[in-house]
Image: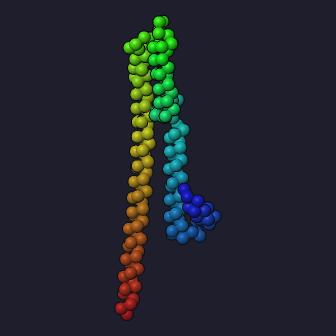
């Protein structure tokens, strides 16, 4: 929320409900609705199981430059160690069969974990989209109501000017 919106909300909240005009009441209700939604999202995030937290952490780390750099360095060290440093007694000589096994195991574990995290993110995105739809629908109804009021006022003023 912007600083200005925050200041307006504080100003409105200092009034008694019956002292607020219609616009201020709508703003207060929208503000309360937004607080409830952000609270719902926070509760959803706090209610994660340890497995979900781990999946999110693995996905976050696995999709970072830190992981890519560390992964590249480990691969280079493995190849250097088995090709040049321990050339005569390499524990995984070229074509690095053990390294391929480790990489396959890593991929087979990492892929489902990332998919779990993406599924959770998709569910959160769906929830936010539904909330956005509700807000947009409420705004559309308010705009229609305002349009009708302006039409009535215009008709009244148009009718008065003919007298």
Q: In this view, does 42 lie above or below 91?
A: below
Q: Evaluate whether residue 75 shows in this view.
A: yes
Q: In percent of the image, x 47 and y 9: which residue is there?
A: 87
Q: In percent of the image, x 40 and y 69: which residue is there?
A: 145
Q: In percent of the image, x 51 and y 27: which residue is there?
A: 70
Q: In percent of the image, x 40 and y 13: which residue is there?
A: 94
Place of residue 5 in the rendered image (x, y in percent of width and height, measured from the top left): 56, 61
Q: Is residue 67 above or below residue 145?
A: above
Place of residue 27 in the rendered image (x, y in percent of width and height, measured from the top left): 52, 63
Place of residue 141 in the rendered image (x, y in percent of width and height, measured from the top left): 39, 64
Place of residue 76 in the rendered image (x, y in percent of width and height, measured from the top left): 47, 22
Residue lying furthest front: 84
In this view, the residue in front, 142 or 18, is 142
Left or right of 14 in this view: 149: left
Q: Evaluate whether residue 52 shows in this view.
A: no
Instruction: Give the quarter of the figure containing the N terminus.
Output: bottom right
Q: In this view, does 113 lie above or below 125?
A: above
Instruction: Give the quarter of the figure containing the C terminus.
Output: bottom left
Colour pattern of the rendering? rainbow
In this view, the residue in front, 11 or 122, is 122
Residue lying furthest right: 14
Q: Is residue 92 above or below residue 47?
A: above
């Amino acid at each position: 929320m912007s600083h200005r919106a925050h200041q307006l909300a504080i100003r409105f909240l200092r009034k008694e409900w019956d002292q607020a005009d219609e616009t201020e009441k709508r703003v207060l209700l929208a503000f309360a609705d937004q607080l409830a939604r952000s609270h719902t999202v926070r509760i959803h995030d706090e209610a994660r199981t340890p497995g979900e937290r781990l999946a999110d952490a693995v996905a976050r780390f696995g999709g970072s430059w830190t992981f890519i750099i560390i992964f590249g360095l480990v691969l280079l060290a493995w190849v250097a160690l088995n090709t040049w440093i321990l050339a005569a007694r390499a524990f995984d000589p070229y074509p690095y069969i053990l390294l391929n096994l480790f990489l396959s195991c890593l991929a087979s574990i990492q892929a489902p974990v990332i998919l779990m995290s993406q599924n959770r993110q998709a569910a959160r995105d769906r929830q936010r989209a539904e909330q956005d739809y509700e807000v947009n629908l409420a705004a559309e109804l308010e705009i229609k109501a305002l349009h009708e009021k302006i039409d009535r006022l215009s008709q009244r003023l148009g009718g008065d000017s003919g007298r």
